[in-house]
Amino acid sequence: MSGRGRRAALPAGGHTRPEYLVADGQGSLVVRHHNREGRVREYDFAQLPVPAPMRATLAALFAARCTPGRWSAHDSSNGSWLQLRRFARFLACQERSPGDLDELTPAMVRRWRAWLPAGAGGYYAFSLVSSLLLDDDRLQAGPVADELARRSGKPRSRLQSYGEAEFGQVTAAARRRFRAALQRINDNAVRLRQWRDGALAEGSGEWTAGEGLDILARTGDLPRCVRKGGQPGNVVARYRNALGPVAWQRLFLTREEAVALGVLLLAEFGWNLSVISGLEVPMASPDQGEDGHPTYRIPLQKPRRGPGRQHETRNVTDHGAGSPGRLITQALEATRFARAIVAELAPGATRLIVWRAWNPGGQRPGQYAHPAADPFRFGITAKAAEDWAEAERLAGSPFRRGRRTVIALDRREPGQHSQDTHDRHYVLPDERIRAGTIEVIAAGAEDAADRARRAVLAAGLRDQPDPGDAETATAACSSFRDSPWPAPDGGCGASFLMCLACPNARVHPGHHPRLAHLHEALASLRSVLAPASWAADWRDAHDRLEDLKERIGPWSWAQAIARVTDADRELVSHLLTGNLDA
């Protein structure tokens, strides 16, 4: 594969913005990634087991992408960093490790590809690192560039949608946990309001609890004892006795409850984890209309959609229980105390999903935090989702499988992606959809076969009689001597019921009443005769009349039934008894 069509190259020698690549005289080579929220993560390329020129080149290539315009989330840089470390370990194991990218060979690239694990993991590892290396100007052409640019077939995704019962179990677990949290927070909000309104007897246990809630709502924590060395200890006894050992949960979501809220948002709207985690606080319309139902404007961001297509908005209305907007109302209620404190501690932080960590100052790896907003955290990490699923005894994080279920099976339309992506990545690979499609195709084929077997009307339809036609019991005949079923004397040897199967026959509105009555009579016979007997004698005639009914339409058919005369009834009776057979 040639190098044509690749991105513009990064010049060799680390020509990048100095604030992203920091080198000192002590052997440190640090790349700083500023994400879209302004937080920084550092990567020390001095750790890589490759020669110094190679480390400098990889650091420069990496740093060029560490901007909000390229990699807006730390997950992007962290994923590439992990794969670069694997690539460096591979190079270090070679008999002759290259000093820099200009010493890389096609054979070495092929060995690296073979060294990677089979399947999706190896495919994405090669794609991440090779795209990074191809930014170097020395790899814009030549056999090494062609080998790096060569792509193998993308592995088929093994991710499948949930079965209906399994997804119901997931959403039930999330609903149970989040509703309990919302009820707890709302109940304590009532007590807090009573304390602030002076409705509690001062000095009582209820009053002390209300005072503690007021402190908690303003600061995020309760007064604590001071340990030796000045470190904070347990909550002061009077508040601990009034509110319990984990008093902070009375007004704030826990990590697990925030995940449960995220799962409910997934089930309702079909958003992926990154979108849910980054949701900003929805704004309610100032004019709620005469019914008073709030409509929320929800800003959405999906960085992978490309420049200029990352942002969109959704409007949802809270029409009451079960409506999409009601979940937004509940999310705002459950996070209101945490968001109020965060707004004071870290102005400008507008995330919807805010929860409180157990230990102030402590942060697990990968948690989304703001230094000034401790002990509060933002959004949902993949690790938090996995831990929640394990606690609920579910098989793995529900977000990817859940999104596939909602998008492909419930909504059945694209969500923040193109129709092509929807078809190729959500619909076609899904076994549950394919299984349902087999039934649909089989039913369609059976219906088509049934229609092909059905006898259809061969007679022509006319708006009015033709004076040259000869009337029969069921139609008018345009050529009695040219019958498909000739009699020995040269005339027609068929029953009058076969007129509807003859191309010489003509049916006009004058025939409609008796034919409509004949149709009803044949249907009545079906209910009293054995199925095989009715099919042998009357099914074809009935099917031709069904075809006639469809052609002239339900309104004309109803009018025909209304115009049935006694003469029509007598004629049909003779037809069914055989007294009018030709």
Image: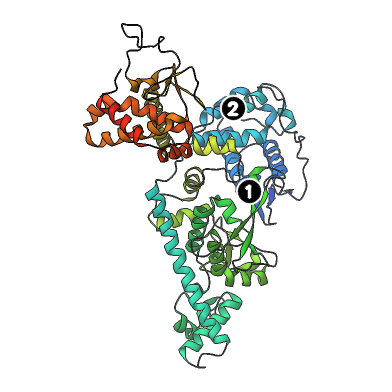
Label 2: element kind: loop
Residue 142 in percent (x, y) is at 70, 22
Q: Can residue 230 be seen in this view?
A: no
Q: Nearer the viewer, residue 571 or 22?
A: 571
Q: In which quarter of the image is the C terminus?
A: top left
Q: Can residue 71 be seen in this view?
A: yes
Please give the residue where the numbered disc 1 appears in the rendered image.
302
Q: Nearer the viewer, residue 399 or 59?
A: 399
Rendered view: 118 above or below 168 = above
Residue 495 relative to residue 243: left or right = left
> Could you say which quadrant of the image residue 53 lies in?
top right
> Could you say which quadrant of the image residue 91 lies in?
top right
Residue 271 in percent (x, y) is at 56, 51
Q: Which amino acid does label 2 sit on?
A: Arg
Residue 209 in percent (x, y) is at 49, 84
Please give the residue where the numbered disc 2 appears in the rendered image.
151
Q: In which quarter of the image is the N terminus?
A: top right
